[in-house]
Amino acid sequence: MRVIRINTSAWSEEDFYLVTTLDDDQIVEVIQPIVNAEREIERDGEDDYYDNEMILQALKDRFPLEYVDMYQEFDKLTF
């Protein structure tokens, strides 16, 4: 199990974290085509975009036996 920060755009506020058993190759296999498709749509002037929830669901659909969850931020303990 690991936590990995996912960045799919130039805006860090759109980053999110996955808690998952997936490895990098599995994550890239699912996310890269989604990001590439959106970039193609942007070049064509269309308005059909993905969101982070769609990415999470695509990962769960592709790897149903693996653990995948998403967080925008984590709780913090300050000492």
Image (cartoon, rainbow, N blue to C red):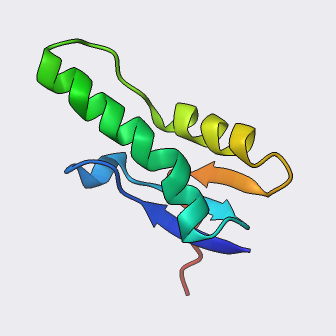
Q: Residue 9's x, y, as percent?
A: 26, 48
- Quadrant into which the N terminus falls: bottom right
The answer to which image quadrant residue 45 occupies is top left
Give me the residue at 86% from left, 52% from top: 65
Q: Residue 15's x, y, as percent?
A: 38, 53
- Quadrant into which the C terminus falls: bottom right
Give me the residue at 18% from left, 24% from top: 42
Q: Is residue 13 visible?
A: yes
Q: In the depicted view, which residue is nearer to us: 23 or 6?
A: 23
- Whether residue 61 is situated above or below residue 50 in the rendered picture: below
Q: On the rendered structure, is 6 left or right of 30? A: left
Question: Can you name the residue that lies furthest to the top here?
Answer: 46
The answer to which image quadrant residue 48 occupies is top left
Give me the residue at 27% from left, 55% from top: 12
Q: Is residue 17 visible?
A: no
Q: On the rendered structure, is 60 left or right of 42? A: right
Question: Can you name the residue that lies furthest to the right here?
Answer: 65
Q: Residue 72's x, y, as percent?
A: 50, 51
- Whether residue 52 is situated above or below residue 73 in the rendered picture: above
Q: In the depicted view, which residue is nearer to us: 54 or 70?
A: 54
Give me the residue at 35% from left, 23% from top: 49
- Whether residue 62 is situated above or below residue 26 in the rendered picture: above
Q: Residue 6's x, y, as percent?
A: 44, 58
Number of numbered discs on residues: 0
